[in-house]
Image (spheres, rainbow, N blue to C red):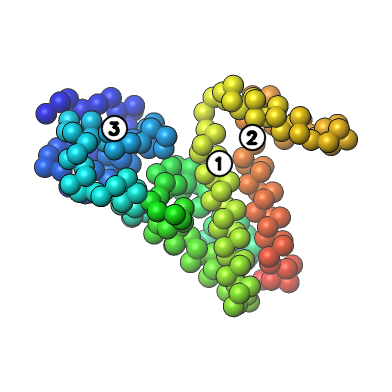
Amino acid sequence: MPPPRKSHGRSRPEYSRPLTREKIAAAAIEIVRSEGQAALSMRKVAGLFGVDVAALYRHFRNKDELLADVGRLASEMVDLETPTEGSWEERFLELAERIRDRIARHPELGIYGGSSPWATPFFARANGLIAALFCEAGLEGPQLVFATQTVLHLVTSVAQSEVMTRGTPTELNRVFAKTIHEQLPEEVQKAWPSTSVRHDWSVDFDALFEFAVRATLGAVAPESLRAR
């Protein structure tokens, strides 16, 4: 068996054989944590165990099936509960921040198999907790479903964007920011605040997240509900 790969400062799972679905999924999680989602491939996972990639296909029909197991295993490793202190709005904002925090600290939660990025136990749990708070505030029926899905999509989208742009800004970041500015009407270019993008060209996700959640919450939950 080959020696363990460099750990990048994190503890690695034991890359021992015989292979099991759980060992393979755990190795995939470690790759995402240390190198990012783009680095994950069946070949790279197989390399950690010193086996041919065909050995993985004896346990998983394809990469999507592996990602589904990654989502399940990652979800089991992450806690998520509704805050119990404060007003309804304070608890709601704290829950949104907890969801963001879990995704930021566990980027493997943001990968998935199949067609839906929310088809993991973690996102199902987040959906349930958001819905419970909206139900407590008096929403029901289609309004409850729409409000829950709107907030869930918003929170997870901002959190996953934060994960993808983490680290030192690249030339692509700068090109993207320049392209945005060039597409703005001239009168908007003059008004576009320089504080929206810092000197290092990275987005202020703390400010963006709070603004987005509060704006969305104000749209789906009237003041009379948020005051509870």
Question: Label 2 near label 3: C-beta < 8 Å?
Answer: no
C-alpha separation, residue under disc 3 versus residue under disc 1:
24 Å
Q: Position of residue 83 (x, y in %)?
A: 52, 61
Please name the residue shown 42% across and 34% down the image. Answer: 38
Question: Label 2 near label 1: C-beta < 8 Å?
Answer: yes
Q: Position of residue 189 (x, y in %)?
A: 82, 32
Q: Is residue 80 visible?
A: no
Observer-nearest of 4 and 21: 21
Per the image, label 2 sits on a secondary structure element best described as: loop
- Farthest right residue in view: 187
Badge number at residue 161: 1
Q: Is residue 127 visible?
A: yes
Q: As shown in the figure, which amino acid type bears the numbered disc 2?
A: Val
Other-residue count near label 1 (Cα within 10 Å), few / some / many at <14 / 14–19 / ≥20: few
Q: Quadrant of residue 193?
A: top right
Q: Quadrant of residue 90?
A: bottom right
Mark found first going from the N terminus, 1 or 2: 1
The residue where tag 3 is placed is: 44
The answer to whether 27 appears left or right of 17 in the picture is right
The residue where tag 2 is placed is: 203
Please name the residue shown 17% across and 25% down the image. Answer: 3
Observer-nearest of 64 and 111: 64
Q: Position of residue 137 (x, y in %)?
A: 63, 73
Per the image, label 3 sits on a secondary structure element best described as: helix
Question: Label 1 near label 3: C-beta < 8 Å?
Answer: no
